[in-house]
Image (cartoon, coloured by chain):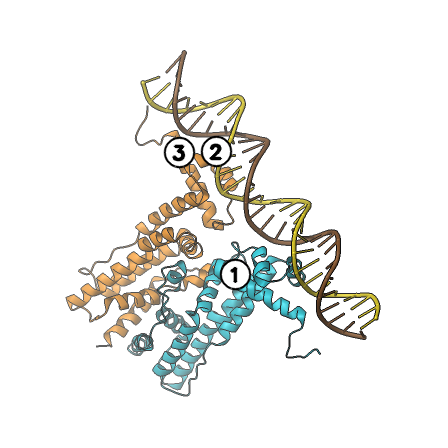
Chain colours: A cyan, B orange, C brown, D yellow
Amino acid sequence: MSDTSVLSRSEQKRRQILDAGRELFMAQGFADTSMDQVTAKSGVSKATVYNHFPSKEKLFEEAVRTRAEEVFAALPELDAMHKHPEEMLTQYFHSLLQILLSDDGSCMCFLLMSEGRRFPDNARLIYESGFGRGLREMALYLAQLDANGTLRIPDADWAASKLLGIVMPPLPMMCAGFAPLIIPPVDDVRRTVRLFLRGMDAAN
Amino acid sequence: MSDTSVLSRSEQKRRQILDAGRELFMAQGFADTSMDQVTAKSGVSKATVYNHFPSKEKLFEEAVRTRAEEVFAALPELDAMHKHPEEMLTQYFHSLLQILLSDDGSCMCFLLMSEGRRFPDNARLIYESGFGRGLREMALYLAQLDANGTLRIPDADWAASKLLGIVMPPLPMMCAGFAPLIIPPVDDVRRTVRLFLRGMDAAN
DNA sequence: ACTAAACTGAACTGACCAGTTTTGTTTTGG
DNA sequence: CCAAAACAAAACTGGTCAGTTCAGTTTAGT
């Protein structure tokens, strides 16, 4: 009767609670979401909610963290060996921006910023799996290009942070609600990447 | 007896309430600050608080807005006629970053982002007097440089947003609590400005 | 000095909410 | 089939908080 591919009744409920909590937390934040709302939305009794999660904080942490990990798991990969850097970076950032500026991605960024003080451990986890990881991989990639002789990039960490800064549309503004929140077209990303590469190139 | 340079008793109280509210809101955000805390910190009775401000929301709006306007009023000026662009931009951004990354500045940015949905009108006001204004003035400046023939900048709006993006350290991360929150030294700012200018220059 | 307005302090209202408890009912594993 | 666990529904506890009320005090203008 119990199949591994089928969730047990208990795990099914747990999933429902997580989904409902996630949706509410992402739409309203932590303070403005009540456990009664979660109860109602999940279609589960309140006692069951507290059977699965000891507190509102723990539910928030797990609901948001798991989704954040899912979202950021889709980050593209950088490959220093193949493709021209301009093309590689353009494609990489185009994918990255699609993730970050998606509904879920921007909500995650918003939560990371607005609830970062209340949940520092959580925020750090999300940061590490998202922006932090992107920054690290980008620095590594640029350093490889430098080692290759493809480009001359003396300070890869510095360059990586500058590159991310110039490619990303202003997230803070978007989160605050003046949100075109439009994913820039590929051509715009390419134009930005070229501006950066020319700036680095002309430095030498 | 009543001197214009001296606040009336009533205005004095009002000022005390605003100051206390501002400090608490900036340190704790809207939800985690209670009106009883404001009452205690202002050294004024609760009834007096509600004599001056009809609600917690209105107090928040006025307290934060007035301070934001003060902070951002100190934004430096751009002058296309004097000084080399590299020097002008370096000084401009160095001043800007000192304001934005000061204790009050970064708190304002944080509040703008985290409470933006609850107070959209307020957030827009602060945005317009801060980032929006900076963006507008920067675009104007770059367009003047283009008209001058000093630089070739076909799309000043695009260039301005890219320039701001590359110069600003990653505010979101800082606000989330992974905050070096270090004001970059002038040399670092200059290096970034030169990266941008070279990138623009090499495009033509 | 007198009046009206503003202030104090403290108690109070009404609402909301996190978390618990209770009384059963359903499901699950052996 | 039978216990043990998980569940539903709803009431309840204890605490917090925005905002009000009120009786009595202080201040400001005339």
Count residues near mark 3 (Cα–Cα under 10 Å), then give few for <14, some for 14-19, many for 20+.
few
Residue B152 x/y as whole percent: 20, 71
| Circle 3 SS class | helix
The mark found on residue B47 in the picture is 2
A70 relative to B107, above or below: below
Q: Nearer the viewer, mark 1 or mark 2?
A: 1
| Circle 2 SS class | helix
Q: Are marks 3 and 1 on the same chain?
A: no
Q: Residue at x 41, y 69 (%)?
A: A101
Disc 2 chain ID: B
* Residue nearest the viewer, comparing C7 with D13: D13
Residue type (three-letter) at the residue carrying disc 2: Ala
Q: Residue at x 56, y 55 (%)?
A: A34
Q: Which residue is mark 3?
A: B12
Q: Quadrant of residue A190?
A: bottom left
Residue B68 x/y as whole percent: 36, 49
The mark found on residue A32 in the picture is none
Q: Tell how many labels.
A: 3
Query: Looking at the figure, which quarter contains the N terminus of chain B?
Result: top left
